[in-house]
Image (cartoon, helix red, strand yellow):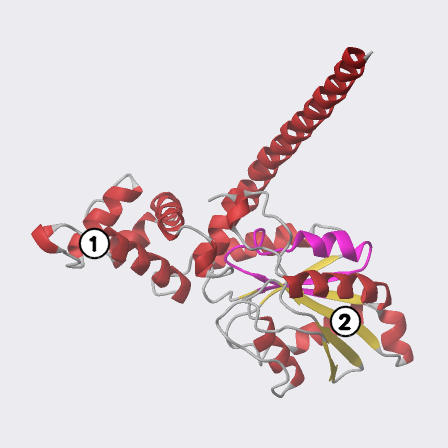
Amino acid sequence: MSNASIQWFPGHMNKARNEVKEIMPQMDVIIEVIDARLPYSSENPMVAALRGEKPVIKILNKADLADPELTLVWLNYLEQQNGVKALSFDDNKAADVHRIVELCKRMMPNKAESGRQIKAMIMGIPNVGKSTLINTLAGRTVAKTGNEPAVTKSQQLIKLDGGIMLYDTPGMLWPKVENENSGYRLAATGGIRDTAFDFADVASYTAEYLITAYPNLLKERYKMDELPKTDWEFFEVAGRNRGLLKKGGIVDTYRMSEILVNELRSGTLGRITMETPAMMEIEEGVVAEQRLAAEAKRIAKEEEKRLRRLRTRKNRK
């Protein structure tokens, strides 16, 4: 999957980013909705860049689809960061939304005690469940919801109980995905459109990860005594077990790959988290090396241009 092939930054997202940048200084608290199955890959690096020192509440949404043990690991990891509070939410948000209001007040005690309005901005990448959460917070339908990424297109203000004014923003991606693994994981969980990547590659990435991280779930779901070691063998065996045969008894491995990804997204496969803090730290190291290599290449190119210009001038003389 090449970075260039993904339409990460459509026009309305660029516009939204500029709007967010403009009103960010007026905000008291940032609420960032992330996917509990990929708390690192679904974080928007622009939030960290734009918020500065402002406190942030990170909501690990869709926690009912995520591995509960890893959700606890991620909550502890995030809480160690400066100015960050983290909560996990599942499908039944109604019982939990008051925790967000209480946390906003705790983070801004001076405003809460004097009865002044607390301004909170809610952000999140497309399809992370932000609109559903807003509707639950507001106690009425104020935000459009849908399974297609990027349903919200413009900002809106929502008055909440407890003296909180909520600024909603469109679901935003960032200009370029540097970590290829994050791209695959976002694609696998439905965070980016199905047209934005090579589906076979994403399915292979998903199978490879699950074979290592959740072997028992795969064996149980796809009726396997022994789990194959490679992604292509897995699709072959699972597809045969499912009776996905084409002419001549050939297994329809593409159909099987679609089933795997859809059953991951729906939670049918079980409660799965696609990344850990340890994985994240290794991948960030790789990305840092890639950045250094790209910068060295750019400098070498500039130097080459400079020398070429010098040679051209000398030849003219």
Q: Residue most toward the bottom?
A: 140
Residue 110 spot, x, y in % from top left: 90, 71
Left or right for 256, reference 293: left
Q: Amino acid at mark 2?
A: Ala
Picture quarter containing residue 121? bottom right
- Residue 125 visible in rendering: yes
**Residue 30: x and y, percent?**
74, 65
* Residue at the image point whose x is 83% and y is 11% from the top: 317
The residue that disc 1 covers is 252
Q: Helix or strand or loop: what does disc 2 sit on?
A: strand
Residue range corresponding to the magenta coloring: 31-60
> Can I make out residue 276 in this image?
no
Residue at 27 percent across and 43 percent down: it is: 232
Which residue is located at x 19 percent, y 48 percent?
237
Looking at the image, residue 240 sits to the left or right of residue 95; the answer is left
Mark 2 or mark 1: whose residue is earlier in sequence? 2
Question: In the depicted view, which residue is nearer to us: 179 or 299?
Answer: 299
Per the image, the residue denoted by label 2 is 120
In the displayed structure, 230 sits above or below 121; it is above
Task: Tell me if residue 123 is in the magenta stretch.
Answer: no
Query: Residue 146 at x, y = what percent?
Result: 51, 75
| Left-right relation of 79 to 237 | right
What's under tag 1, amino acid-wise? Asp
Q: Nearer the viewer, residue 109 or 137?
A: 137
Q: Secondary structure at mark 1?
A: loop
* 57 in the magenta segment: yes
Mark 2–mark 1 Cα distance, whole angstroms, equals 49 Å
Q: Position of residue 204 (x, y in %)?
A: 35, 46
